[in-house]
Image: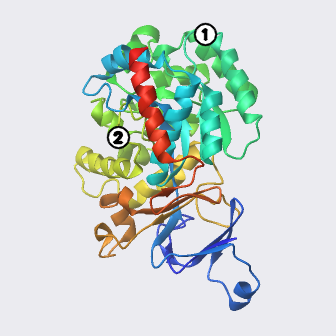
Amino acid sequence: MIRFKNGTVLTLNNSCEPQSCEVWTEGDKIAFVGNPTDEQLKNTAFEREIDLEGDLLMPSFKNAHTHSAMTFLRSYADDLPLHDWLHKQVFPMEAKLTGEDVYWFTKLAILEYLSSGITASFDMYFELDDYVKANVESGFRTVLCGAVSGERENAKVLEERYLKYNGLKHPLISMQLGFHAEYTASFGLMEDIAALAEKYKAPVSMHSSETADEVWGCRERYGKTPTELFESLGLYNYGGAAFHCVHLTKEDEMILAARGVWAVTNPCSNSKLSSGVAQVAHMMDMGINMAIGTDGAASNNALDMFREMYLLSMLQKIEEMDAAAMPAEDVIKMACTGSALAMGLTDCDCIAPGKQADLLVIDLKKPNMQPLNNTVKNLVYSGSKQNVRLTMCAGNILYENGVYRIGEDEQRIYARCNELADSLKAR
C-alpha cells in the first residue's frame, strides 16, 4: 500500500475542482480516496508514505495517438509538406527498420512520455513483438492500434495480431482493430476490416481527414469523404477513433457524433506539417467525443502533453475568435479522461477506488505555478514538464524527481539510439 498525503487531489471523477484528501494505492489499483480516520490509519500498513507537501495528485495523461518508435526520425525531415515528408522521407526510412530498432526507439519514447506525465499510448506501428517487449520491460501501458495497409489479404494479418496481443492477457497490453488510412488501404482491405469489426463487435481506428488533399483524393476515388466512406462500409458500427480530423464536413461531424467515434486531435503535428487546425471547440459543441495525442516525434517533434494542451487551447481561441473557447478544464479532461476512454482504458479515466493506479504528481512550488489562483488553469496555460514530480503506472513509480525506474539506464538508451540512428542512415 502506498499513501499519498498532505496535498490536493484532482480526481476528475465528475469534478474538475482539486480537493484536499488522500489517495492510497494497493498493487495496481486505487484503494482509497478521502480523508482517513485515525482508526483507518492505525489499521493500515503502508509500504511507503509520500508527502505531497501541498503538491497536486491527478490522473496521468494518456497519449491517444502516437507512433512511439518514430523517435528515430526526430528532426530528420523537418520543414516539409506532409506528402513529401511522408513519401520521400518517412516511408523510405521506415522500410529499413528492424525489430531491434523499434525496441530501442520505443524505450526512448517511453522515457519522454514518463517525464511528461504520460502513462499510456495508443500506438500505431509495426515490429509489434519488439514494441510490446519494450513496453512490458518498462512497465508502461500501451494499446496497439492496427497499422495495416495495402491489399485485402492484410485483414488476415490484422486479425492474427488482434487475437495474439489481446490473447496475451497482460495487464499493460491490449490491441484494437485499425488500419493506417484510406489513402494507403485498398477498398477490399477496408471491406474486410469492417467484417472483422462486425465479427468481434469491435471499434476500428485510423488516420482520417488530416489534410485537404486527403479528403479531395478520397472524393475522387469514391465520391465520398473518408468519414462518409468509413460509415458506408460499416467501419464505425462499433465506434473507434479517427486521428487528426482536421478537414471535416458537417455530414462527417454528424456521423462521428452519432457513432460515438473519438476524434483525436494532434495540434502540434498538424501545425508543424501545416495540415490545418481541427475545429475542436465546434466538434465538442456537436457532441463529438474528443481526445488528444502527440503523434510521432517525426512530425511533432516532442512527445509532450503540456505542449499539446497549451497549443490546443490557443488555436481554438483564435479559430473561434473567442477567448472563452476551449477552457483549461475541458482540455485537462480530454488529456486524461477522454484519451483514456478513446483507447478503451475505461479503468484509467479518473481517480476513484478500484480504478487503475495511473497517477501523476505536479510540483506546485515551481515559479510557473505560483500564485495558486487556479491550479487547473495553471496546468494548461503555464504548466510544463518541469512540473512533473512523479509518474505512476499500474501502481509502480516509473519516474520520480528526474529518476527513471524502467529497468534500463537512460544513458544506455540514448547511446544505443544514436548508434542505431546513424546505422539507419547508412543502410
What residue do we see at 43% from left, 14% from top? 427
Front of the two marks 1 and 2: 2
- Mark 2, residue position: 267
Q: Is residue 186 visible?
A: yes
Specify few, some or many for label 2: CA neighbours under 10 Å numbering under 14, 14-19, or 20 or more: many
How many numbered marks does the figure carry?
2
Residue 319, by quadrant, is top left
Provide residue 39's location: percent of width, then percent of height.
74, 89
Q: Is residue 261 visible?
A: no
Q: In this rendering, is residue 322 above or below 130?
A: below
- Label at residue 98: none
What residue do we see at 58% from left, 50% from top? 406
Q: Secondary structure at mark 2?
A: helix
Q: In this rendering, is residue 172 above or below 377?
A: above
Which is nearer the eye, 236 or 419?
A: 419
Q: Label 1 sits on what residue type? A: Gly
Q: In this rendering, is residue 14 above or below 370?
A: above
Identify the coloring: rainbow
Q: In 3D space, how far apart are the residues under numbered discs 1 and 2 (Cα atoms)? A: 32 Å
Q: Label 2 sits on what residue type? A: Pro
Q: Secondary structure at mark 1?
A: helix
What residue do we see at 77% from left, 84% from top? 43
Which is nearer the eye, 393 or 161?
A: 393
Specify few, some or many for label 1: CA neighbours under 10 Å numbering under 14, 14-19, or 20 or more: some
Provide residue 337's location: percent of width, then percent of height.
53, 54
Query: Left or right: 165 with respect to 306?
Result: right
Residue sitting farthest toward the bottom = 38
- Label at residue 188: 1
Query: Left or right: 176 with respect to 422?
Result: right
